[in-house]
């Protein structure tokens, strides 16, 4: 009944564009008002067009995702391998940190990784060897989604680090925007108006002195994330060989509390800055625990560590495999019986 009513209504809606009927047609014309079934080819073309549209859509910035309440999960890339960078992106990490502080590569090697990550539509963060204007300038000209600046120990150092990432008069960044990759080699006219809003500035707090000032560092205008550094923190506290020491854990928890409390208070005072909290997963403090404690950005793995673990397990599995002489033949018979055998 409903179908008949719908068909009648559809016929009325198109009646004004249909030709007048012939006086005596031999075979009454049959007008189908149902949508034609799309061919598989048409469906495939439509799906491809939709995928292409998604691919061409701008990738949300890390800043916008944090503001939307997302918890971001990332990987550190120490190998400077574009292939591993691409795999990490395709695996689904929200961001990849190309580590120029502890990795063997510099600006040239980082560029190849950025190109791989950009092609896979995954934001790249460059960790600098030191917080200085020269490194910041060269890194920003490549066009990363953010910078990570190591060993920030005071609000003054944090403010100076932010100035390295901004053009005058708000900072000291050298201006070569008409010709650098960050501005699409001068083809992106919007770069100057949005670069400071889009670029995520991460200050690493990784010493006892920095932890003591963490609430003031997180309040510095322009600091988007404070990244806890548990290994360096343990070393600065005298526990290099014991990063899971009770005193180190207590210092980390206190620093976490201050940053997270400041974030909660920001709603009441939106004009003040309150950085997000970032951290590294450790064997004694896995990524899931950081997420549960309220971290906004969690670096859960290192590419070299993942490969090391997989390689060790692969070799161990082979070395520990035991097989008696003649066992293989028996396995073949079992496979035949189970239907797995083929010539």
Image: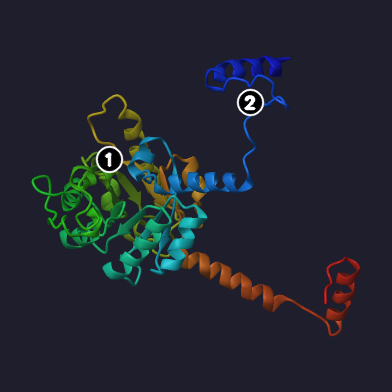
Question: Which of marks 1 and 2 precedes in the sequence?
Answer: 2
Kindly state the secondary structure of the residue where label 2 is placed: loop
Quadrant in which the N terminus is drawn: top right
Residue 180 position in % (x across, y down) = 20, 59
Whole-number angstrom distance, CA of label 2 to CA of label 1: 67 Å
Q: Quadrant of residue 194?
A: top left
Q: Which residue: 22% across, 29% down?
A: 271
The C terminus is located in which quarter? bottom right
Would you name the residue on which mark 1 appears?
A: 215
**CB within 8 Å, label 2 to label 1:** no
SS class, disc 1: helix
Q: State whether residue 318 is above or below residue 295.
A: below
The residue that mark 2 highlights is 33
> Which label lies toward us, 2 or 1?
2
Residue 275: x, y in percent? 30, 40
What residue sits 42% from the left and 43% below the top? 295
Rendering coords of residue 274 (x, y %): 28, 37
**Against 216, is 166 above or below?**
below
Image vertical order of residue 83 relative to residue 32, above or below: below
Q: How many marks?
A: 2
Would you call the spot at circle 1 few (<14 residues within 10 Å), some (14-19), or many (20 or more)?
many
């Amino acid at each position: 009944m409903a179908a008949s009513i719908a068909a009648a209504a559809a016929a009325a809606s198109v009646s004004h564009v249909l030709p007048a009927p012939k006086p005596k047609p031999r075979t009454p014309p049959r007008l189908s008002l149902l949508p034609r079934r799309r061919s598989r080819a048409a469906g495939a073309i439509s799906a491809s067009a939709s995928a292409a549209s998604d691919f061409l859509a701008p990738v949300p910035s890390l800043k916008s995702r944090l503001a939307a309440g997302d918890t971001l999960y990332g990987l550190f890339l120490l190998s400077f391998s574009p292939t591993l960078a691409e795999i990490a992106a395709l695996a689904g990490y929200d961001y990849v940190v190309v580590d120029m502080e502890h990795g063997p590569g510099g600006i040239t090697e980082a560029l190849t990784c950025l190109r791989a990550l950009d092609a896979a539509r995954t934001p790249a963060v460059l960790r600098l060897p030191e917080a200085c204007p020269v490194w910041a300038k060269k890194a920003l000209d490549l066009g990363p989604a953010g910078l990570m600046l190591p060993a920030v120990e005071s609000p003054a150092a944090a403010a100076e680090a932010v100035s390295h990432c901004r053009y005058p008069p708000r900072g000291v960044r050298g201006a070569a925007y008409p010709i650098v990759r960050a501005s699409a080699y001068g083809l992106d006219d919007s770069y100057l108006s949005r670069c400071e809003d889009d670029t995520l500035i991460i200050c690493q707090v990784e010493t006892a002195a920095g932890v003591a000032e963490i609430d003031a560092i997180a309040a510095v205008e322009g600091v988007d994330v404070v990244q806890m550094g548990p290994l360096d923190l343990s070393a600065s506290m005298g526990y290099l060989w014991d990063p899971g020491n009770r005193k180190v854990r207590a210092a980390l928890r206190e620093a976490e509390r201050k940053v997270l409390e400041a974030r909660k208070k920001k709603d009441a005072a939106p004009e003040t800055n309150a950085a997000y909290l970032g951290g590294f997963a450790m064997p004694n403090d896995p990524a899931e625990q950081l997420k549960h404690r309220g971290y906004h950005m969690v670096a859960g793995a290192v590419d070299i560590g993942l490969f090391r673990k997989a390689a060790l397990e692969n070799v161990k599995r082979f070395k520990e495999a035991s097989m008696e002489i003649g066992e293989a033949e028996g396995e073949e018979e079992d496979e035949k019986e189970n239907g797995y055998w083929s010539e």
